[in-house]
Image: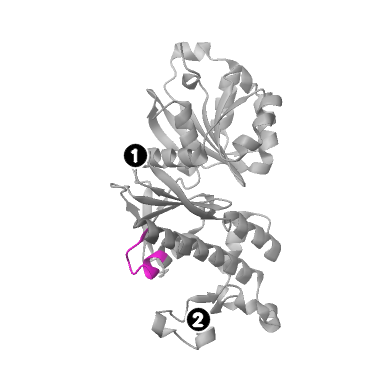
Amino acid sequence: LQSWGSLFPWFGLDIGGTLVKLVYFEPKDITAEEEEEEVESLKSIRKYLTSNVAYGSTGIRDVHLELKDLTLCGRKGNLHFIRFPTHDMPAFIQMGRDKNFSSLHTVFCATGGGAYKFEQDFLTIGDLQLCKLDELDCLIKGILYIDSVGFNGRSQCYYFENPADSEKCQKLPFELKNPYPLLLVNIGSGVSILAVYSKDNYKRVTGTSLGGGTFFGLCCLLTGCTTFEEALEMASRGDSTKVDKLVRDIYGGDYERFGLPGWAVASSFGNMMSKEKREAVSKEDLARATLITITNNIGSIARMCALNENINQVVFVGNFLRINTIAMRLLAYALDYWSKGQLKALFSEHEGYFGAVGALLELLKIP
C-alpha cells in the first residue's frame, strides 16, 4: 500500500502571521509510463507552479533559491520556494479548489499558526485535509536538512567579516560542521529563540513580540509605506542618529567606566521628545531608527540567551532578514562587539523557508 506521502504533488506549507511559505518538489525523472497515467490536474499544477515566477499580484517564486537535482525519496527533481502574504490565504484555498487539488491527494502537511487558523477553510472550501505540524519541530528539521544538502554546490550558511565597515564588509561562507549546541533565532512577525543541543533535543528559551511585524507595522504608521520592500528602501536612506539619543548626546562622549562608546544608542527614539528634532527628521530617518530599534533589541536578547545557555554559535533565520542586509550586518557587528569576539552571528540563504521544508520532509516521512 502506497503511503499518501509518496504520491505527487509534494508540498510543504508554513502559514505564518505575515507570510505563507510554500515549497514544491518538481519531479524531473518522470517516466513515459508515469506521464501517460498522470492526471490532467497534476500536470496543470506542475506547469502553473514551475512556468510562473509570480502568482496573482502578490505570490512570488524565489527563483534564486531553487535547489536543483535534489534526490528525495528516490526521486530526482528541483525544489521550488514560493511565498505570498497570509491575507491572500483564501485565494490560495480557492485556487486549490479550482485546480481540483482534492482529487489528487487529500492531505496537506502544514505548519505555522495558520495551519490551525485556516484548517476549517481548507476542509470546507477546498475539501483538503491538513496534517498539522509543530512549527519549531519543522523549523529545526528544515534547517538541518537544507544545511546538509547545501545550496547547489555552495554553502547554505554564511557570516559577515568587518560588518561595520561598508568598504571592507564581506559575506563569507561558513561550514556548520559541528552545529551543536546552537542558538537559533527565528525572526518572523515575532521572534522565537531556541537552544538546539541535538536534532531531537531542543527547547524554546524565550522570544519577543517585537519582531519583523513590529518593524513593518511601525514603518507603515510612521512613514505611510505600504510594503516591506519600501520600508527597507526608506531605511537604507535614513540616518537614525537624528531620531535616537546616543550615549554621546547624554555624556558628551563615551561612558568610559562601563565601556559604553559614544556612538551606542542610549535611548531609541529618545530625540523625538523634542519638537525641534521631530520637525527636522525625515520619513527615511524614522524607518532607519525603527529598523535599528527592533534589530538591536533582538540582538541583545539573543546575546543574553547565548550567555545563559553557554552557546557561542548563533544562527539568525526568518523572513525579517530577507533583502535586509542592514539588519544582518548590525546583528553581526553587535554580537561580535558586545561579546568581545566570543559570539558569531550566522545567517542562512533560505532564511524564511525552513518550516515549510520541515513540513515537506514530514509528508515524505523523512526522519
Q: Which residue is mark 1?
A: 148
Tell me if residue 58 can be seen.
no
Judging depth in this view, the residue of 285 and 62 nearest the camera is 285
Q: In which image quadrant can residue 106 be found?
A: top right
Check disc 1 and give the amino acid type: Ser
Relative image position of residue 216 (x, y in whole percent): 62, 57
**In the image, is residue 34 above or below residue 226?**
above
The CA span between labels 2 and 1 is 44 Å
**Residue 134 relative to residue 123: left or right:** left
Label whose residue precedes the other's in the sequence (2 or 1):
1
> In this orientation, does residue 138 appear?
yes
Q: Does residue 182 sit above or below 9 in this rendering?
A: below
Magenta stretch: includes residue 340: yes
Instruction: Please name the amino acid that badge 2 sits on.
Output: Val
Stretch in magenta: 335-344
> Residue under circle 2?
247
Whether the residues at callouts 2 and 1 have beta carbons within 8 Å, the answer is no
Q: How is the image coloured?
A: one colour
Position above or below: 104 against 241: above
Q: Write down the quadrant of residue 239 in the picture.
A: bottom right
Give neighbour class at mark 1: few <14, some 14-19, many 20+ (Cα, 10 Å): few
Give residue 151's position: percent from left, percent from top.
38, 42
Numbered tag placed on residue 180 in the rendering:
none
Left or right for 198, reference 108: left
Secondary structure at numbered mark 1? helix
